Every structure is written in C-alpha cells, then in structure tokens.
C-alpha cells in the first residue's frame, strides 16, 4: 500500500475529478442551457465586441467593379507591345466615383485614378511614375503583364457569399467587412446577464472603513472586470449571508433573474459550504472538487435554467477558474459557442518539480531572449497573491503526469490576451 501524506489532499483523496472531465461537464452544462441571450439590432460601432446573431451575406461583389489599383493610365492589353512599350493617345479621364460613360476608344488610353472603375475595353493600368507624356499622348513602358494594377470585381468577396455566420465575435475588421457591404447595423446577441455574489464573514466592500480581521472584497471588482472583457454584463448582488437558508433563498431568487450566477468564496469542504449544499438541494451539481491547482474547490451546476459557478475564494484561484470555466461558459450562453483558450508551445525558462495527478496552472511571465519567447514561472505559489497575477502574462499549464520541468522543456502557455486582458 502506498503511504498517503497527510498534507496532500490529492493523494489522500483520489476521487477528485480530472480537469478534462470537469471541463467537459462544464461544456455539457452550457450545451444543456443553450444560448440564453436575446438578440438586438445595433449600429455597427456598437456591434464591435458583440456576438453576431444572424448571418450576413454579400448582396453584390466586393469590389463591385474592376478598378484601378494605382493612379496612372488604363488601356487594353491587346493595344500594347510588352516588348517595346507603346505610345497611346489619351481619350478619357476617369476619377474615382465617376465611371466612364461608354467604352474606352480602341487604341487609346484613359487617365485613371486609384479606385476608379475600369472602363469597358481596358484591362491593364500603367503606374503614372513609369509613364511619360510623349507630346501626343502617353508612353506606356514595356514589361507590363495583362491585368497589371487592376483589381478585379469580387476579388475580396463574391456576391451571395455568406461572409459572417451567427456566433462569430465581431472584431473591428469584421465591422469593416459588414460596412463594405453597405449595411449600417448588425443583429447581435445581447450581453449575457450575470449575477455576482461574494461570500465570507470577513469581507468588507471597498469604501468601507477597515476593521481588524477584515478582508476587502477584491474578487467582486476583479470578476466584474473580467466578465466585462468576456462580453457579459455583471450585476453585483453583494455578500451572501452566512446562513444556509439565507444562501438558498438568495441563490434561488437570483436564478430566477440571471442566466448565470457567479459566487466566490465558501465553495470548499468547510462547514460553511452553503453553495454546494444549495446546488445539491435545489438543482444539479455538474462538477465539484477538481484535480487542479489552483481552484480545487470549484463547483458548478444549475438551478432551473440558470448556471451557477462557485469560484474559490482565493483571488488567484477565482481568477484562474474564471478564465478556464466561466469565460467559455459566457461565450457559449452568449451565442459564440464553447471556445477553448489557445495554448502556445514555448520553451520553459525555469526548473521545478511537481506532484503528479493534478493539472497545474502556474502564473508565468514571457521573457524574450535572442528573439525567442520563453516562459518563466512566478516564484511564489500562494493563491492569495494578487501581485502574482499583476506580474504574470499568462498561465503555464502543467499536465497531470508531469513531475519535473527543466529549462528548455516545451511548455503550454495560455496568454491572458486570449481573454481580452491587454498586456
Ligand atoms: N481543509 C481544507 N481547507 C481548504 C481547502 C480544502 O480542500 N480543505 N481548500 C483550500 C483551497 S485550494 C482554497 S482555494 C480555499 C477556497 O475556499 P473557499 O472557496 O471556501 O473560500 P473561503 O474559505 O471563503 O476563502 C478563501 C480565502 O479567500 C479569501 N476571499 C474570499 N472571498 C474573497 C473576496 N471576495 N475577495 C478577496 N478575498 C476573498 C478569504 O478571505 C480566504 O483568505 O480553501 C482552502 N482551504
Ligand atoms: O487551489 Mo486553491 O484554489 O489554491 O487557492
């Protein structure tokens, strides 16, 4: 029989849920609840950052016409000698927004400007810097290929093409694409409404006078800011009272109003664990007690049509669990589908040993050495150190089976930018 160390609850309790299973259960919870956000039509600039709710198809080609890519002279390639160049009389002037009425006369060139519609009969443009006035017209230099300096109709987008599908997160470049089709508005999902509780008798709200033994509630402000970046709209519902009946009452009440409820603190195995008890009594538990560090006491489940996530009280654990579980949950409930944060493989710039059997997410900083990015760990591991989150650029993910990391070993890095947190 293997000896169990008393100070390691993972060895002492082999029943903790593996990380991948817990994430799959969170995903199943999200799938079961579906998209909870209603839709609304928004002007384009307000739509940026939102999730698209209806497909957007192109009513016409973009660009709509063949057009000049440079200021210069448009002509028919069939009138041109690519070996020696050609002198052509200039019979028209075409500015952007003012297409030529009729076709270009055969054997002539048109003075044309960037973005102006190519006249019928012309297929090639010489850049003005490469030409000269030969007295009677313009000299087109040798060496141009057919179609040079011409942008084809539909080369960006084809008429009828579905450009954006429901569920896509609208970025500035998507807004540009929608505007290029001539649409001023987009149908979007509303932000997911989230009710937020904190939990703990020691908590004071920022602004309250300090008292001995107290801790200011930093999780509420942090989670509100994170949820805002995730595209949700948080309502701070205050601190949960320390009574099982009162917690059950407040949670049930909130579940009737919000499709997602977050709470931090009071999720561990201590006597004060009213949240998990409420989920057991009034709803369903999807995951609880996961083999991860930090964040082991996380729990999640539902009451009716509302998802509830009990985040651990330690600020680092609350932050990490938000990124791992709540961020994708908000995306999914908000219509964007479940998205797993991307991992970037890079060499470790540190050495450490690790206990097997649990997934660890340690705080990491990016170092650039000789043009290569490497990840360094934050030396202290305490789950209450907000400073460590401020120093870090992201999380280093260490798999269950890993027991040792040496400098140069490939590691998986999840930058905070994946969650909209700017460096
Ligand atoms: N016997 C055990 N003790 C603990 C376990 C365990 O499994 N067995 N798990 C540890 C781990 S890991 C964590 S994480 C914490 C999580 O506990 P809770 O989620 O129940 O949170 P609390 O006990 O209420 O608080 C923990 C810690 O965080 C501070 N806190 C809580 N809320 C806030 C807030 N809104 N803003 C700032 N700081 C907050 C609180 O003061 C505590 O210091 O349990 C371990 N113990
Ligand atoms: O794992 Mo707890 O979630 O360290 O702070």
Image (tube, rainbow, N blue to C red):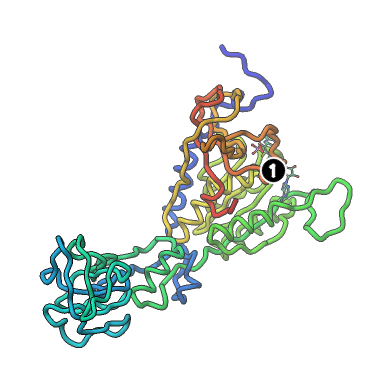
Q: In this view, does 219 lie above or below 9?
A: below
User: Would residue 367 be visible to someone looking at this image?
Assistant: yes
The answer to which image quadrant residue 393 occupies is top right
Number of numbered tags placed on the structure image: 1
Residue denoted by label 1: 314
User: Would residue 160 be visible to someone looking at this image?
Assistant: no
Whole-percent x and y of residue 357? 53, 26
Q: Is residue 78 above or below residue 251?
A: below
Instruction: Kindly identify the residue that appears in the image at 29 percent across and 65 percent down.
Output: 156
The picture quadrant for ligand 2 comes to top right
Which of the two residues, 208 or 275, is positioned nearer the viewer here? 208
Left/right of residue 344 with respect to residue 222 in the rendered view: left
Instruction: Kindly identify the residue that appears in the image at 66 percent across and 40 percent down.
Output: 268
Residue extending furthest toward the right: 212
Left/right of residue 165 with respect to residue 279 in the rendered view: left
Whole-percent x and y of residue 205? 78, 57
The answer to which image quadrant residue 124 occupies is bottom left
Whole-percent x and y of residue 286? 50, 45
Which of the two residues, 40 or 37, is positioned nearer the viewer here? 40
Q: In this view, does 86 lie above or below 296?
A: below
Whole-percent x and y of residue 394? 58, 43
Which of the two residues, 162 or 211, is positioned nearer the viewer here? 162
Q: Quadrant of the N terminus?
A: top right
**Judging from the image, what secondary structure is the residue with disc 1 in?**
loop
Residue extending furthest toward the top: 1
Mark 1 beta carbon near ligand 2 (under 8 Å): yes
């Amino acid at each position: 029989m293997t000896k169990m160390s008393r100070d390691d609850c993972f060895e002492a309790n082999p029943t903790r849920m593996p990380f991948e299973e817990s994430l799959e259960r969170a995903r199943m919870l999200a799938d079961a609840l579906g998209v909870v956000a209603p839709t609304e039509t928004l002007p384009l600039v307000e739509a940026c950052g939102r999730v698209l709710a209806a497909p957007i198809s192109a009513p016409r080609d973009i660009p709509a016409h063949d057009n000049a890519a440079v200021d210069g002279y448009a002509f028919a390639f069939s009138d041109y000698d690519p070996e020696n160049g050609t002198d052509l009389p200039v019979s028209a002037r075409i500015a952007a927004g003012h297409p030529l009425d009729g076709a270009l006369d055969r054997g002539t060139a048109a003075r044309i400007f960037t973005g102006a519609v190519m006249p019928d009969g012309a297929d090639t443009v010489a850049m003005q810097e490469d030409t000269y006035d030969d007295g009677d017209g313009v000299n087109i230099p040798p060496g141009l290929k057919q179609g040079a300096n011409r942008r084809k109709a539909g080369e960006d987008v084809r008429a009828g093409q579905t450009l954006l599908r429901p569920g896509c997160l609208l970025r500035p470049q998507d807004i540009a694409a929608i505007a290029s089709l001539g649409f001023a508005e987009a149908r979007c999902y509303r932000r997911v409404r989230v009710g937020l509780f904190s939990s703990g008798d020691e908590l004071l709200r920022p602004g309250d006078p300090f008292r001995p033994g107290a801790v200011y509630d930093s999780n509420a402000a942090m989670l509100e800011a994170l949820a805002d970046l995730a595209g949700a709209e948080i309502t701070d519902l205050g601190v949960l009272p320390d009574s099982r009946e009162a917690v059950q009452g407040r949670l049930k009440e909130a579940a009737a109003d919000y499709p997602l409820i977050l709470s931090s603190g009071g999720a561990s195995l201590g006597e004060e664990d009213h949240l998990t008890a409420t989920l057991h009594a009034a709803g369903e538990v999807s995951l609880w007690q996961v083999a991860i560090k930090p964040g082991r006491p996380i729990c999640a489940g539902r009451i009716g049509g509302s998802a509830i996530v009990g985040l651990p009280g330690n600020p680092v654990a609350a932050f990490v669990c938000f990124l791992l579980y709540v961020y994708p949950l908000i995306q999914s409930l908000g219509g964007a589908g479940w998205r797993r944060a991307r991992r970037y493989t890079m060499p470790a710039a540190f050495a450490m040993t690790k206990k097997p059997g649990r997934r660890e997410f340690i705080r990491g900083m990016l170092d650039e050495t000789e043009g290569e990015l490497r990840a360094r760990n934050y030396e202290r591991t305490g789950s209450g150190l907000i400073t460590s989150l401020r120093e870090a650029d992201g999380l280093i993910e260490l798999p269950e089976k890993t027991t040792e990391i040496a400098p140069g070993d490939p590691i998986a890095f999840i930058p905070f930018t994946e969650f909209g947190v700017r460096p």
